[in-house]
């Protein structure tokens, strides 16, 4: 579970994220959606301890990220919005490197690497350097690295970017399997159709403010004239741009 309470991030005199609160509960896939520059990546970086909040608290499985960062970081697997890391390592070297960081038992690695490497279709390329990988292959190896220590919380920033249809389908299956085990998945996406089909709950942000957090069913119930999440999202953000009422739930 992730609990964000009154989170604000300020750069200079500008609040990039403004006093937002939400919970990513266990047993659910929670989508984090918003326009470019809405504050999604800033919020995710604060949750993962990459940046410090200006105000507010963030806990992961009850552990305060600011007070116990190392213990908190052991709780989650994180896929950033860029897969261009550790390019000089082979895929296999990278996976073992990440597994070593998390003290993942050696006997459990081989099975994970084979299973997920085959599900993503890159098992035969694991001895090649990541530098030689396509963008989509780099994304796959970063996802595998994030999951190799079997974290209870998944935090994924635009994880579908660059994935081929088979790999995207496999990842969505993995996300659902993970949530069905009573664990939590939090991911940002620009693809509203994916969010609508996959998510149990939704957080919508615009210009650093939280417009909605809750179940997709409840969101649709309050917007009966809107047929899809895309229509609801456009309606919410258009209303905000026009300075009318916000939907804070």
Image: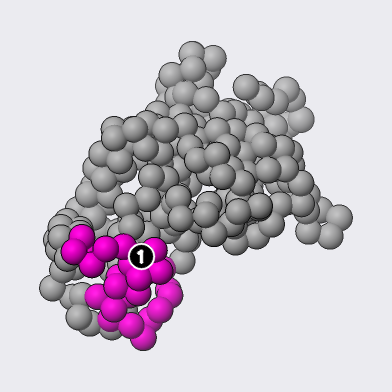
Res. 100 image quadrant? bottom left
Residue farthest to the right, as pictured = 13
Q: Is residue 57 left or right of residue 193?
A: right
Label 1 belongs to which residue?
Answer: 103
Q: Is residue 31 left or right of residue 58?
A: left
Point out the image quarter for the C terminus. top right
Q: Residue at x 40, y 79 (%)?
A: 86
Q: Residue at x 45, y 50 (%)?
A: 75
Q: Is residue 84 left or right of residue 205?
A: left
- Is residue 43 shown above or below 12? above
Magenta stretch, residue numbers: 83-109
Is residue 104 on the magenta stretch? yes
- Is residue 214 shown above or below 174? above
Residue 5 appears anywhere in the view:
yes
Residue 190 appears anywhere in the view:
no
Q: Position of residue 103 (x, y in %)?
A: 36, 65
Q: Residue at x 15, y 60 (%)?
A: 111
């Amino acid at each position: 579970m992730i609990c964000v309470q009154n989170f604000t991030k300020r750069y200079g005199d500008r609040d990039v994220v403004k006093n937002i609160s939400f919970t990513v509960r266990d047993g659910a896939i929670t989508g984090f959606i918003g326009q470019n520059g809405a504050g999604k990546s800033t919020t995710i970086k604060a949750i993962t301890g990459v940046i410090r909040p200006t105000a507010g608290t963030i806990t992961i499985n009850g552990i305060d990220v600011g007070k116990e960062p190392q213990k908190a970081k052991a709780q989650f697997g994180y896929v950033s919005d860029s897969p261009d890391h550790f390019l000089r390592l082979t895929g296999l070297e990278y996976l073992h490197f990440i597994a070593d960081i998390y003290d993942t038992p050696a006997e459990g690695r081989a099975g994970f690497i084979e299973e997920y490497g085959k599900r993503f279709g890159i098992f035969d390329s694991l001895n090649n350097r990541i530098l030689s990988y396509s963008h989509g292959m780099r994304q796959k190896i970063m996802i595998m690295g994030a999951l190799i220590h079997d974290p209870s919380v998944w935090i994924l920033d635009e994880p579908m970017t660059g994935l081929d249809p088979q790999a995207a389908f496999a990842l969505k299956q993995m996300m659902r399997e993970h949530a069905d085990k009573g664990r939590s998945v939090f991911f940002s996406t620009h693809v509203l159709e994916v969010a609508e089909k996959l998510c149990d709950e939704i957080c919508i942000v615009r210009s650093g403010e939280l417009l909605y957090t809750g179940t997709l069913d409840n969101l649709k119930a309050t917007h009966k004239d809107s047929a899809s999440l895309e229509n609801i999202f456009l309606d919410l953000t258009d209303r905000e741009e026009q300075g009318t009422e916000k939907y804070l739930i």
